[in-house]
Image: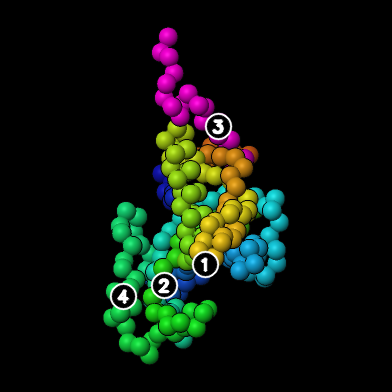
Amino acid sequence: MTKEVTTIGSDGFDGCEDRVEGDGRESAIRVIQGSKWSFTQDCKWVDDSDQAIPADTEVTVVGIERVIQKWVDDVPVETRFIPHGELIPNIEKLNAACPKEEWGEDVNGKPRGPWQFQYVLYAVDTDMGKITFPTGTVGGKICISELRDKVVNMRKFRGEHVYPVVSPSTAWMNTKFGGRNRPDFKVKRWISFGCGDGVALAAPAPVAAVTAAEELNDEVPF
């Protein structure tokens, strides 16, 4: 007699969630995942408990998203993640179409439309705890854009599975008021995650730095 064997294709970690059918959360989108990092007006990095984040903290950046949200009475009533490759919607037009009773005020007391745009950076710490850094400021945009460029350039040489290990830092930014520090991420090293081949790794594999010859593509072929 042949014994029937049932094969389980998943260990349950990826699909083990607490959402219940019909509770309104099936399609809910959470922008903030894990601990929230912020860059304050006095140019300091803090966590969601307003505790200072040590400058030697290292996290691995695993993704960047662009998000627009509609806020009414300080509550996000609509959230849209912009698909990769698509243009950012015109926030001014979206706000112009909203009734004035949905508008609020910015930190300077000026009228502010309900729709807001922000970049959202996702990272994990050494224990794989999730970290989120959302930012809608000019300095935050520069911070994330510069990191994105570094990742894109490194992946040209080391492949798509390369990710940066970074520490929170600051960089000077010129403004019409004379300049100030903005948020910045200092890349400490690069690592490569596993590609799903089932091989257990003690730690992510380190990635060699790009040489000048590689960057310039001017090695002599003999």
Question: Which residue in the structure is indicated by mark 4?
Answer: 94
Q: Nearer the viewer, mark 4 or mark 1?
A: 4
Badge 2: residue crowd in 10 Å (few <14, some 14–19, many ≥20): some
**x, y percent for residue 110:** 46, 82
Q: Height in image: 204 above or below 215?
A: below
Tell me the kind of residue under disc 1. Ile
Image mark for residue 209 = 3
**x, y percent for residue 213:** 48, 23
Tell me the kind of residue under disc 4. Leu
Q: Nearer the viewer, mark 3 or mark 4?
A: 4
CA gap between label 2 and label 4 equals 10 Å
Provide the secondary structure element on which disc 1 rests. Answer: loop
Tell me the kind of residue under disc 3. Ala
Q: Nearer the viewer, mark 1 or mark 2?
A: 2
Badge 3: residue crowd in 10 Å (few <14, some 14–19, many ≥20): few
Chief SS of the magenta region:
loop
CA gap between label 3 and label 4 equals 44 Å
Q: Is label 1 in contact with label 2 (beta carbons under 8 Å)?
A: no
Magenta region: 203-222
Q: Is label 1 in contact with label 3 (beta carbons under 8 Å)?
A: no
Q: Is residue 190 left or right of residue 115?
A: right
Q: Is residue 49 left or right of residue 65?
A: right
Question: Which residue in the structure is indicated by mark 2?
Answer: 116
